[in-house]
Image (cartoon, rainbow, N blue to C red):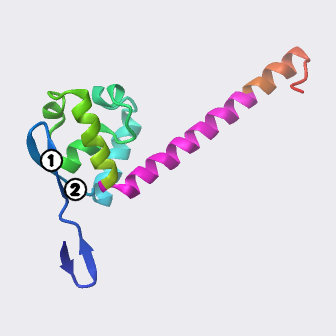
Amino acid sequence: MKNNGDVHFSAGKQVSFAGTDVVVQELTVSQVRQIMDDLENNPAGHFIDELLDSKMPAAAIALSTGMPLDELAQHQPSALDELAKEVEQANPFFTGLIQRRLKLYQEMKGAIRKHSESLSNSSTGTSAN
């Protein structure tokens, strides 16, 4: 850990990935912001995002490890899944942000469904009760 006055910075965690050592770093606020902005513009993300059942976007895995997305795509999904878990552990604030956004999305989806059902019932004259 590096020390800058009273603030401590993590040097990252070295993990084994596909037979090589990779350092998993905590993302900076700027990097997290850039990933979130990119996801707003392209919600589908990368094919890796569709393939893995991970909260961590492929772009975050790439930034956290310094490995380009096209290099990550050359590995087996099971290996990527393990690496994604390491990135999640190294980025608890980002993981929390993603969980909060997913919860909000689910709540909004439920509210829209209820509102839609209410509108449908009122147009047919039936009651939701």
Residue that badge 2 annotates: 25
| Place of residue 125 in the rendered image (x, y in percent of width and height, measured from the top left) | 91, 17
Q: Measuring 38% from the left and 32% from the top, which residue is drawn there?
A: 53
Q: Residue 114 falls in which quadrant of the image? A: top right
First-in-chain label (2 vs 1): 2
| Part of the protein shown in magenta | 90-115
Picture mark count? 2
103 is within the stretch colored magenta = yes
| Place of residue 46 in the rendered image (x, y in percent of width and height, measured from the top left) | 29, 30
Amino acid type of the residue that numbered disc 2 sits on in the rendered structure: Gln
Q: Is 2 located above or below residue 14 in the figure?
A: below
Which label was assigned to residue 120?
Answer: none
93 is within the stretch colored magenta = yes
Q: Is 19 located above or below residue 93 in the figure?
A: above
Residue that badge 1 annotates: 66
Q: Are marks 2 and 1 in contact (CB under 8 Å)?
A: yes
Q: Residue 44 falls in which quadrant of the image? A: top left
Q: Measuring 14% from the left and 27% from the top, which residue is drawn there?
A: 74
| Place of residue 51 in the rendered image (x, y in percent of width and height, measured from the top left) | 33, 25
Amino acid type of the residue that numbered disc 1 sits on in the rendered structure: Gly
